[in-house]
Every structure is written in C-alpha cells, then in structure tokens.
Image (tube, helix red, strand yellow):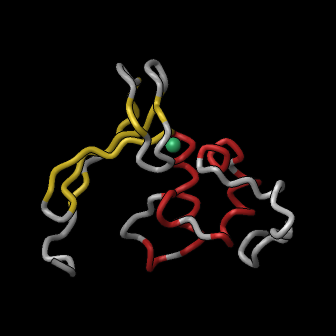
C-alpha cells in the first residue's frame, strides 16, 4: 500500500446520544449509553466507516489541529498523535481527556510543568 490513492470523504458530523456502548476512537475508552458523542461517517482510504468520539475528545482534537496548523488538516487521532510536548496543554485544557488517555503530567517528576511555546 502506501500513499493515498483515494481522497478521503467525510460527511457532516453529527452529535448523537449513544444507544449502546461504543468505543471512543480518540481515547479508546467507552462511550456509555445515554452519553452524547460526536459521530462522523466517511470513507477513509476507500473504506467506509464511522468515527465516534467523546465530545470533549473531539474538542481537544480540534484545538490540537488549530495549534499544529495546516499540515495536519488530514486529521488527528488523539491516542496516536498526541506527543509528550502536548501533555501539558492537554492536562490543563482537557484534564478529563488527559486522564482517559492515561496522561498524568503532574504525577511524573521527570516532566517539568512548563508550557510549550505555543500555549499562551
Ligand atoms: Zn474519548
């Protein structure tokens, strides 16, 4: 494989109430029945699929895309794309998301709580 032979297509995202338990595609944790979640249907690399995420995970991903600028507009999946230098921002702005991703910045003595340059 390699390369992107087909362009990705995504349809308008919707916000849904979960009728059953799903797995969040950002943090890999459960979306519980009755919880609102973010859903996008699309075709990625030629394969139709549904992307589901916690609303705050998706908010975090959108902010991440804003910070990381245009070269990342293909998308972001938090559990794959968040780097150690993003942990400070995530723990400050989205502590629940950081917690679900298993990021414990303040508990790690090797991690100085210094904001990266792009956090104002
Ligand atoms: Zn999530």
Does residue 107 sit above or below 99 in this rendering? below
Q: Residue at x 56, y 65 (%)?
A: 82
Report which quarter residue 33 is drawn in. Answer: top left
Residue 51 image point, x, y percent: 33, 46
Residue 12 image point, x, y percent: 30, 46
State how many labels appear.
0
Which quadrant would the N terminus be assigned to in this image?
bottom left
Q: Residue at x 44, y 73 (%)?
A: 72
Q: In front: 4, or 62? A: 4
Which quadrant would the C terminus be assigned to in this image?
bottom right
96 left or right of 54 in image: right
Does residue 71 sit above or below 86 in this rendering? below
Report which quarter residue 64 is drawn in. Answer: bottom right
Q: Residue at x 57, y 42 (%)?
A: 56
Residue 49 image point, x, y percent: 21, 47
Residue 32 image point, x, y percent: 47, 25
Q: Residue at x 66, y 70 (%)?
A: 84
114 left or right of 33 in image: right
Q: In front: 79, or 48? A: 79
64 left or right of 11 in image: right
């Amino acid at each position: 494989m390699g390369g992107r032979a087909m362009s990705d297509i995504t349809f308008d995202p919707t916000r849904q109430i979960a009728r059953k338990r799903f797995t969040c595609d950002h943090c890999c944790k459960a979306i519980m029945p009755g919880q609102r979640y973010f859903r996008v249907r699309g075709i990625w690399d030629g394969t139709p699929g549904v992307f589901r995420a916690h609303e705050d995970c998706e908010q975090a991903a959108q902010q991440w895309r804003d910070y990381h600028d245009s070269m990342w507009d293909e998308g972001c999946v938090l559990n794959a794309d968040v780097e150690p230098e993003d942990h400070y921002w995530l723990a400050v702005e989205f502590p629940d998301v950081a917690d679900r991703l298993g990021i414990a910045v303040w508990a790690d003595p090797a991690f100085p709580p210094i904001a990266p340059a792009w956090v104002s």
